[in-house]
Image (cartoon, grey):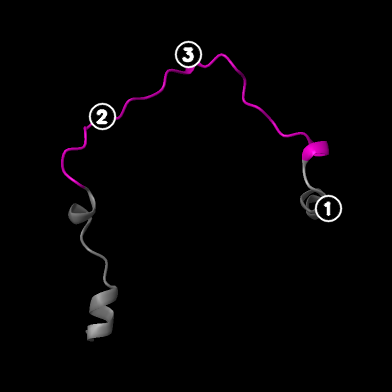
Amino acid sequence: MTARFARMRKPPIEELQPDGLPDEFPVPNPDENDEPPKQIGWAKMPRKTSAVLR
């Protein structure tokens, strides 16, 4: 392996994860969010986007 490819090699996964992170991440409760997801209407989209989708 040449030096150029040795520099491009990714570090092991263990080095990418910093220590001290909690094992479980908090999951948001879906019941707390009463609002339905907002959708963008076709009239509000730019003309380029709607022309491409035709």
Picture residue at 62% right of the left edge, 20% below the top:
36
In the image, taking residue 26 as reference, residue 11 lies left or right, namely left
Q: Name the residue beneath numbered marker 2.
A: 24
- Left or right of 19 on screen, residue 4: right
Under mark 3, the amino acid is: Glu
- Is the magenta region chiefly helix, strand or loop? loop
Q: Is residue 14 left or right of residue 44?
A: left
Residue of label 3? 32
Circle nearer the N terminus (2, 1): 2
Please provide percent x and percent y for residue 47.
Answer: 82, 50
Tell me the kind of residue under disc 2: Glu
Up the image or down, 2 lies above or below 45; here it is: below
Q: Residue at x 22, y 63 (%)?
A: 11
Residue at 26% x, 29% y is 24
Say if mark 1 contacts mark 3, CB within 8 Å.
no
Task: Report the span colored magenta.
Answer: 18-44
Query: On the image, numbered disc 1 is attached to which residue?
Result: 51
Task: Please tell me whether residue 26 is drawn above or below residue 10 in the rendered image.
Answer: above
Amino acid found under the numbered disc labelled 1: Ala
Nearer-N-terminus badge (3/2) = 2
Task: Describe the element under mark 3 as helix, strand or loop.
Answer: helix
Occupied quadrant, residue 12: bottom left
